[in-house]
Image: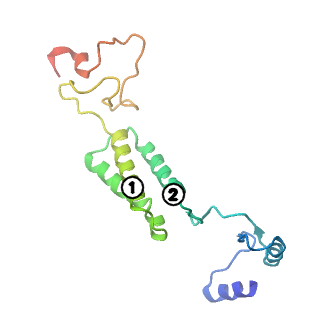
Amino acid sequence: MKELIETYGRASGQLVNFNKSSVVFSKNVTRVMQQEISSFLGVQVVESHEKYLGLPTYVGRKMTTTFQYIKDNLAKKLEVWQGKLLSGAGKDILNRVVAQALPTYAMSIFQLRKTFCEDLEQMCARELLKNSSYWQIGDGEMADIWSNSWIPELRSGKPSRNGTALAAVTKVRDLVGASGF
């Protein structure tokens, strides 16, 4: 087996670093045989390889759980963009480029279900819009002071509520009165 690997290495130019390598055996291989092979090759035996080249080595029936890391990576990227003022075109580009690029590598290897990809795209669009957009105030009648993002200079987009805030003041229009903007 070792000679076969070395022959492949000479032919392809791809050498195996046995010091950094490990091996996973199926349940059908006895412990004795596992020990013999691992000591002959000079590699350690491990229960499983979680990822190889950034992809999961085992995909079970719960694909959504297996590929959750794609959604998590997207959420981290969206968090970085939170609060940044982006034009509509900027949001569209981020949505298209990032949301579509993150799963591309995994999709080239595995057949991800259409629903997973659609869910990822919807999550991206929804989060990107929610976290990086602000109300256009207009007359202030529709913008809620406490729950809508309407102040670009504040990280949360809205003022913090304190004990002195009047309960009657709920819309941005209430802050300036009937005189308008």
- Tell me the quarter of the picture where residue 11 sits: bottom right
Residue at label 2?
67
Q: Position of residue 28 (x, y in %)?
A: 74, 73
Secondary element at image label 1: helix
Q: Are marks 1 and 2 in contact (CB under 8 Å)?
A: no
Which of these two is toward me, 68 or 101? 68
Q: Amino acid at mark 1?
A: Ala
Disc number placed over residue 99 in the picture, else none? 1
Q: Amino acid at mark 2?
A: Phe
State the residue at coordinates (42%, 57%).
116
Which of these two is toward me, 14 or 31? 31
The alpha-carbon separation of the residues under discs 1 and 2 comes to 14 Å
Q: Is residue 122 above or below residue 31?
A: above
State the residue at coordinates (26%, 22%).
172
- Tell me the quarter of the picture where residue 169 sits: top left
> Where is the C terminus found, in terms of image quarters?
top left
> Where is the N terminus found, in terms of image quarters?
bottom right
Q: Counting other residues with Cα less than 10 Å from the Cα at mark 2, is it few (<14), some (14-19), or many (20 or more)? A: some
